[in-house]
Image (cartoon, rainbow, N blue to C red):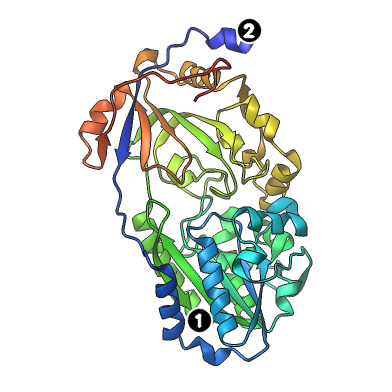
Amino acid sequence: MSILDELVQDIPIPKMVKVKQSFDNKQINDLSKELNKQFDHKNLESQIKPGMEVAVAVGSRGLDRLVELTKVTIDFLKKHGAKPFIVPCMGSHGGATGPGQKAVLEHLGVKEEVVGAEIRSSMEVIQIDQLENGLPVYVDKIASEADGIVVINRVKPHTAFRGPVESGIMKMISIGLGKQKGAEACHQLGFKHMAEHVPAMAKIIIDKMPIMFAVATVENAFDKIAKVEVLLPEEIEEREPDLQKLSKATLPKLFFDQIDVLVIDEIGKNISGDGMDPNITGRYPTPYAYGGPEVSKMIVLDLTEETEGNANGVGTADFTTQKLVDKMDTTTTYANGLTSTVVGPTHISTAMPSDKAAIQAAIKTCNILDFTKVRIVRIKNTLEIGEIEVSENMLADVENNENLTKISELYDFNFNGDGDLV
C-alpha cells in the first residue's frame, strides 16, 4: 500500500442513491426534413453555381447528429451542382496537425465515405487583415481558395468569458477557420477581451471571404437539437445573440447550490473544449465567466477515448487518478494551453492511485467536521447529467426539488480489486 493510500484509507465513503434530473426535452426528431426546409426557405440554390467548390467547415465538438448535419448539407450542395469538401474547423485540436485534425473528425463519425465528401486538412493559413489593435486575422488557406464556405456549429455559452456572442458561429469563423494561428491571435490578449475579438474577427472574415451560409443548432439539456437555423452571412451578427439567449435558457445544470465533492467519471475535448463544461461544474478557467454550483473539491477519474490523450481541464480539478495521467498526451494537452494562453487547466492535479483513493482524498480535504455527512455528486460527464448519483446526506435536497426524483435505494459504491469504480 502506498503512502497516499495509507493517508486516506480510513476516510468513510457514504452511501449513494441514483437521481433523475428533469429538463425540457423538446427536440427536432426529423432533422433532415427540418434542415432541408430551412435551405429551401433561404433560397440558397440561387447562390450555388454548377461546379463551384464549397468548403464545409466542421468542428471538433461532439454536436448532436453532427454526421447527419454534415451529410444533409453536403447532399444539398451536391444536388444543386456544387462540389463540396470538408475542412476541419478547429484551433489547436488534433495536436495542431493536419492529419490529427482529420482524425478528430473521423473519431466523431465524419468520414469521407459516410458524408460523401473529401476531407482536406492542413494547418496552413493566410492573413487577410488585422484588427485596429494590430491582432492579425487568419483564414484556413484551403478554405480561402474555395468558391464558397459553409460553417456548421452549435451555439452555446462559452466556458471562459461572457458576452452577447460566445461559442457558436462567429467563434467558429474567427477561431476555427483561423486554425491554430487564428486561435492563438484571438486568445493573445486573453479572455478579458474575447467578447470583443470574436465578433470583430468574424465580421472581417464574413466581409472578405465567400461565406455562403451557416448552419446553427441549439441543443436542449440532453444535448439533443432543439432548434436548427440556417443563417445567411448578413444574418449571423443579428441572429446569433438571440440563439445564445435561447441556449442559456435551456442549459442543463446540477440542481444543487453547494456540493462538497463532485466526481466526474470522464473528461475530454469531445465533451467540451475545457474537457468538462464549467457551466455545469461551476469551476471556470478564467475570472471572466461565472455561474453554477459552489464546489469544494472536484475529481476527474478518466479520459474519453475520443479525446486521444488531450487532458485539457484536468488542472481545473483538485484530484485525478494515475490511470488518467498515464493516458495523458502531454504534447496535445500543453498545445491547448499554449494556444488559449490559459495554462492552468493543463496542469496535472493531485493524482491518486485509484478512484477510491481519489474520492477519499477529496472527502478528507473538503473541510467538514463529519465525513459521513459529506455532500457528494457523481456524474458520468458534463454532457450526460439526466441521471446522476448523490450521497445520502443530499436526499432532503432531492425531495424538496420538483426537478429531482429518487430512482434507486441507497447503495455503496462498487469498487474492483484495484480500487476503481465498476
**Structural distance between the alpha carbons of marks 2 and 1:** 62 Å
How many discs appear? 2
Residue 232 is labelled as: 1
Residue at 53% x, 89% y: name it. Answer: 45
Q: Looking at the image, is 214 positioned above or below residue 48?
A: above
Determine which residue is flagged by label 2.
Answer: 1
Q: Is residue 189 visible?
A: no
Location of the N terminus by quadrant is: top right
> Which of pointers 2 and 1 lies earlier in the amino acid sequence?
2
Q: Residues within 10 Å of mark 2 (few under 14, many from 20)?
A: few
Residue type of the residue flagged with mark 1: Leu
Q: Looking at the image, is 147 positioned above or below residue 352?
A: below
Secondary structure at numbered mark 1: loop
Residue at 74% x, 65% y: name it. Answer: 121
> Could you say which quadrant of the image residue 136 lies in?
bottom right
Q: As drawn, which residue projects farthest toward the front? A: 113
Residue type of the residue flagged with mark 2: Met
Q: Is residue 169 found left or right of 229 in the rendered image?
A: right
Secondary structure at numbered mark 2: loop
